Image (spheres, rainbow, N blue to C red):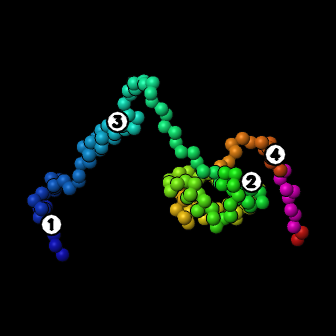
Amino acid sequence: MAFSNGSDPLGGSGLHRPLADINVTPLVDVMLVLLIVFMVTAPMLATGLRVNLPQTKASQPINPKQPVVVSVTADGVIAVGTDTVELPTLSATLLKLMEGDNTRLIQIRADKTAPYGAIISVIDELSANGLVHVALVSDPKSRAPAAAPSAAPAPVTVDK
């Protein structure tokens, strides 16, 4: 068994040993300052600068391309605009109508009682042919009154 005489092999003795802990207080101070700097500057970078734009008489507003409307009726009939088309020819009809611009938006307007499979078939046909800019159109107005919550069912008793 070895006994110690009070001397430390690392050079310190007793109460005066070398400190092996890292002081993280300066690191925390720097990180908090950086956090505040980023919190102050981030909103300025996102909004941009305020400028007074000049006015002209000859400028014309940019007309975005109108979306192509594909309709699915309650009985599953597919139409592009007012023309009825079959599912296998839908993509070819749209590509011809869009003049090769695959980035143009295609709106799908489906009757709420249309078969779910017909709507999925239209979306699948479009995506299989590279037409992926698709939007499903809904009516934001609520025409029917909200259904009142039904009464809770009567408790079921089990005979033992």
Q: According to the image, label 2 marks what residue? A: 112
The amino acid type, in three-letter code, at marker 2 is Lys
Q: Is residue 22 visible?
A: yes
Q: Reading the chain from its start, which is encountered first: label 4 or label 2?
A: 2
Per the image, the residue denoted by label 1 is 4
Distance between mark 4 and mark 2 Cα atoms = 21 Å
How far apart marks 1 and 4 lie (CA) works out to: 85 Å
Q: Is residue 55 left or right of residue 143?
A: left
Residue of label 4? 148
Which element type, helix, strand or loop, lies under badge 3?
helix
Does the magenta run of residues contain 107?
no
Q: Are marks 4 and 2 in contact (CB under 8 Å)?
A: no
Q: Bounds of the magenta span?
A: 151-158
* Residue drawn at the location 26% of the way across and 46% of the way down: 27
Quarter of the image with the C terminus in it: bottom right
Choose mark 4 or mark 2, whichever is in front: 2
Q: Please state which amino acid type lies under the numbered disc 3.
A: Thr
Mark 2: few/some/many CA within 10 Å (<14, 14-19, 20+): few
Q: Is residue 52 toward the left or the right of residue 86 in the image?
A: left
